[in-house]
Image (tube, rainbow, N blue to C red):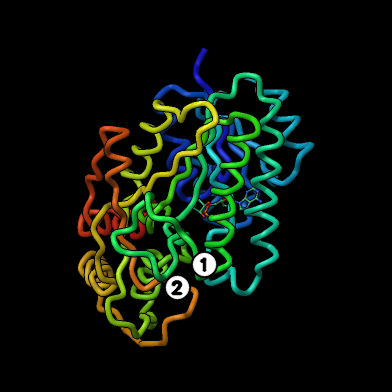
Amino acid sequence: MPRAVFITGAAGFIGSHVARAFLDSGWKVVGLDSEQAAPELSSRRLALLRGRLGFHYVRGNVGDRPLLDRLFAEHPDMETVLHLAARAGVRQSRLTPHAYITDNIAGHVTLLEACRSLPQLRQILYASSSAVYGPSAPLPFSESVPVGGQASFYATTKRMNELTAQTYAHLYGFAQTGLRFFTVYGPWGRPDMACHGFARAIWDGKPITLWDADGLARDFTYIDDVVSAILMLAEVPAGVGENRIFNVGYGKPRSVGDLVRCLERSLGKTARIRKAAKPAEDMLKTWADTTALRKMIAWQPETDLEEGVRRFADWFLTGD
Ligand code: NAD
């Protein structure tokens, strides 16, 4: 019998990549997604997964308890749950905070409640974010430093996910792993994120907006490195009643200007840049200390920004 994983957000950027990797490794994958984010891209990502042996998919909302109960009754063999479904945009969360609370917080609790009836559940991995560190955390960001003062509703929902997981670990002994992702980019990436959004604007000859702030930098992390960390962590579950948290990042911040230069080189076009004040909900700089993750698994990110952007641009220009 193949091992089975339930992936929420399976039509999303990270979810579709990681679903493919689990299938490649011989796992059964049951995917769920509401397809509310970037629907056109979601259906193209799903087209690559549909029809693959061991892939089961349902379109639906993670907050739909009857749907989860039905799915879990049909697939009682799921040993791993990977919860990636969420509203993921930082700036959008300022405009629609209630929607973030519904999808990111209430949806997470609904999933955890439903997980209580999964007979073979071994572990839950869930997406958190580098955004939980907030603007005043010391650099590089370390999991050992208490976090607080989140700058966006998005970050608050992700911190709430970590706290909720902690309570479920305590109450029900769930073995959980929180993944603080750092600016993940690559083929099939989100159009609302800098790499894809800038590429589209540069290609179309439209201006891109850079925040007028000294030291603006991100720990850009290539999707394949994120996928390999998730698959390796799935082999080393947290202990019973443990809620461990890891930074998943490249470990070296690069300026947003570097990202633009890499895109210009790979696309063969020059960016038109305009400056604007940095929104209060955006972080100035992110930088992952990955010591804890590398102690847990033999993981080393392999793709630097130059190579990662080159691979992204290949996909952007050819569509596959
Ligand atoms: P994404 O938007 O591509 O994927 C998320 C998917 O979840 C989407 O397909 C969306 O339709 C789905 N979804 C949203 N709400 C849902 C709901 N209520 N029910 C079912 N499906 C729902 O985003 P991504 O970049 O792949 O991010 C995956 C996870 O990682 C998210 O939780 C995000 O917050 C987190 N994260 C991502 C990054 C990054 O750089 N990409 C960084 C930090 C954290």
* Residue at image mark 1: 90
Q: Is residue 49 visible?
A: no
Report if the beta carbon of the residue with label 1 is closer than 8 angstroms to ligand 1.
Answer: no
Mark pair 2, 1: CA separation = 7 Å
Q: Position of residue 155 (x, y in %)?
A: 52, 62
**Relative to 3, does residue 246 appear above or below in the rendering?**
below
Q: Position of residue 293 (x, y in %)?
A: 32, 40
Helix, strand or loop at disc 1? Answer: loop
Say which residue appears at 58% left-offset and 35% top-offset: 169
Foreground of the two, 176 or 196? 176
- Left or right: residue 13 compared with residue 114: left
Say which residue appears at 39% left-offset and 44% top-offset: 246
Q: Quadrant of residue 87?
A: bottom right
Type of amino acid at the residue the image marks with label 1: Val
Q: Is residue 293 visible?
A: yes
Helix, strand or loop at disc 2? Answer: loop
Q: Position of residue 302 (x, y in %)?
A: 22, 45
Disc 2 crowd rating (10 Å Cα; few below 14, some 14-19, many 20+) is some
Query: In the rendered structure, are the residues bearing label 2 and label 1 in contact, judged by CB atoms less than 8 Å apart?
Result: yes
Q: Position of residue 4 (x, y in %)?
A: 54, 23
Foreground of the two, 310 or 74? 74
Q: Residue furthest right?
A: 66
Type of amino acid at the residue the image marks with label 2: Asp
The disc label shown at residue 282, or none: 2
Say which residue appears at 70% left-offset and 23% top-offset: 74
